[in-house]
Amino acid sequence: ECPKCDLLQFEYRRRLADKLAKIQLDIARLAGTKPVIVDAKWALQLSEVVAELDPQRRRSSGDWDFSARLSDMGPAPNTTSDGQPRNVCPEVYKFDKKDSPYYQKGMYQESCTYIPKFYEILTILIPSQSWKPEDLNVVAKRITKYYDIRIIGLVNHSTTFNNSMPEKLTYLEVKHAESDSEAISRAAKLIKTPFVLIGNNLSQFNNQSSLERLVRVLDELPSVKVAAGAARDSQGRWIHGCLQQKMENYHATYDLGYYSSKYECMYCDDLLTPFVTHTKLFEQVPLQKGLNGPIVFHDWFVRVRHAGHLAVTCPDVMFYVHTHPIMTEFDWRNFAQKWSLTSLKSYDNTHLKFSCDEVKISCKGLNEVVRYFLMPTCCTDAIHGEIGYILNYAEQNNLHYELHCGSGLGAVKLGTHLPWDFDMDILFDCEDWSKWLEIKEEYLNKRNCTMDIRTVKKTWKYFKIYCPTLRYEFLCITAKHNLSRVLMPEEFVNIPTKIYFGGRWTSVTSNPGLTGRNNYGIEDLRHANHWSKLKTKNEKAAMDGHYDNPGTWNKCPSPNHHACLDHFPGDGNIPFVKR
């Protein structure tokens, strides 16, 4: 007997289901888009699921699928695993106990004659425009001690040249007012070799920086387009530099680490260290113009991933650098502005939050934004500020109110304004009508809000408050005195039900869950676009606020945007509230 086995099996299945559901969502959002994008990470993730279900199938074929052969296996074929000509000789592994305890040997490059000269394969590009010329010369001389290859060094347009530069080093002057990204792109166009090393911050070079190893990985793993090494700075601090990156709902997360590996290299979304890539990748995924500093490649790696490519770090390759990249708050704000982010967790565990103004996000036109996208979180924050200000007036003047319709449902499901709703609904007591009208004077003007009295009838009254971010609709029904509080036991009639909404306890209908279920019907806890933005087959269902298929979203026209509604499940609240 194993009383916990069923629970363990359930948790295991749920974890696998989560992985598969994420892949399914990604495939669904890109299905039918042009150009066709097949994300290489899908194959990687699916192979991990297969391996968990059946470890014997981790390697689906009988072929040798490792980074190096063993010494008794004989020489490797002269083509890669997918039949392409090799650019560098393969490796063989020969363990030698005598090399203890430092183990500087073990992987050996085989002798082969069928490969091109290495200078025909790779060029080194060093973004050194902020360096002194002598520092660039020193690094170039160190490199040419080990490799007979061309080196291009970017230098400031005001740099004074001398005659001591190494023969293989070419200076490329950065033009006046030319950004880092534009200078690197211009240099990349001069490179004739299929591979390029981007030598960010290089300070030294020796035989521990095996460029053949990185080219070999790119040869053997066609889905991997960028391969980096680890890095050691001038103070001896070593990092592997492998980052996992995720953007969703106007928030970006960077974590230093890896989930999976192959050929002793870590799969990464972004890199902090010098890397080798296919030169043509800069044509396929160009650097964004006008960027400077570390943001240049953080921005580029986002788009490399959007194109469906993978990157790796091989920590056995070590580069010597002056310093590791440092992203300041100013750098991250520029990055956030580029990608419409309102918050971010950096790889150094720094948490940053930006206002709409800081990242140039407009909260105007939310009516159309929510057709396909989640409302920006800074706009949601602004809404909570506006409604909080209005409800403060109600509470200061003892005016009764209740969140209603979609606002009440949003409070139940998310504890916040629904980020796909473009107005707010509030019930109030008709006996307080005249007191509510007094708000339109000095109080509303302080928030640049205005009141519009739309309807006054015998049975109901209605007004709207327009604020810079949202429209707030207030309704009272003459026959429904004291709102839904009258439905509660007598001792609670004067204690309205409150729900945590937008950071404050806010009055709502007496039983908000029941109100939502009866108003919206079957599967009301699932999500869908506002009925006015959703195509339905049943017109009456749309007008009633009900849906043909709860839990579905409109297909996003910009599938790579992190706030597309169809990136998110149509059920549950955790994906919308977690940070």
Image (cartoon, helix red, strand yellow):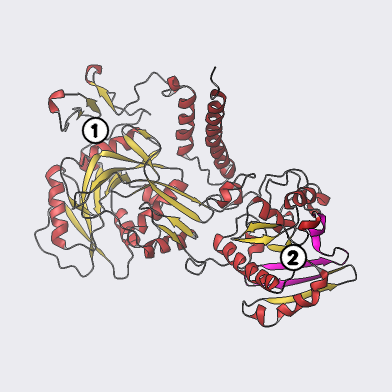
**Residue type, mark 1 in image:** Ile
Separation of marks 1 and 2 at Cα, in angstroms: 78 Å
Write the residue at 17% across / 54% down. Answer: 169
Tag of residue 401: 2
User: What percent of the width, then of the height, locates residue 96?
Assistant: 16, 24
Kindly check if marks 1 and 2 are in contact, taking CB atoms under 8 A apart as contact. Answer: no
Write the residue at 23% across / 36% down. Answer: 116
User: What percent of the width, then of the height, locates residue 428?
Assistant: 77, 67
User: What percent of the width, then of the height, locates residue 565?
Assistant: 61, 51
Residue picked out by circle 1 = 115
Quadrant the N terminus occupies: top right
Write the residue at 54% across / 23% down. Answer: 5
- Relative placement, left or right, of 411 versus 350 is right
- Relative placement, left or right, of 369 versus 337 is right
Vertical side of 184 occupied by 458: above or below = below
Q: Does the image show residue 533?
A: no
Dot 1 surroundings within 10 Å: few (below 14), some, or many (20 or more)?
some
Mark 2: secondary structure: strand
> Which span of residues is magenta-colored?
462-488
**Pick the front one: 570 or 427:** 427
Judge whether residue 165 is colored magenta.
Answer: no
Tag of residue 477: none
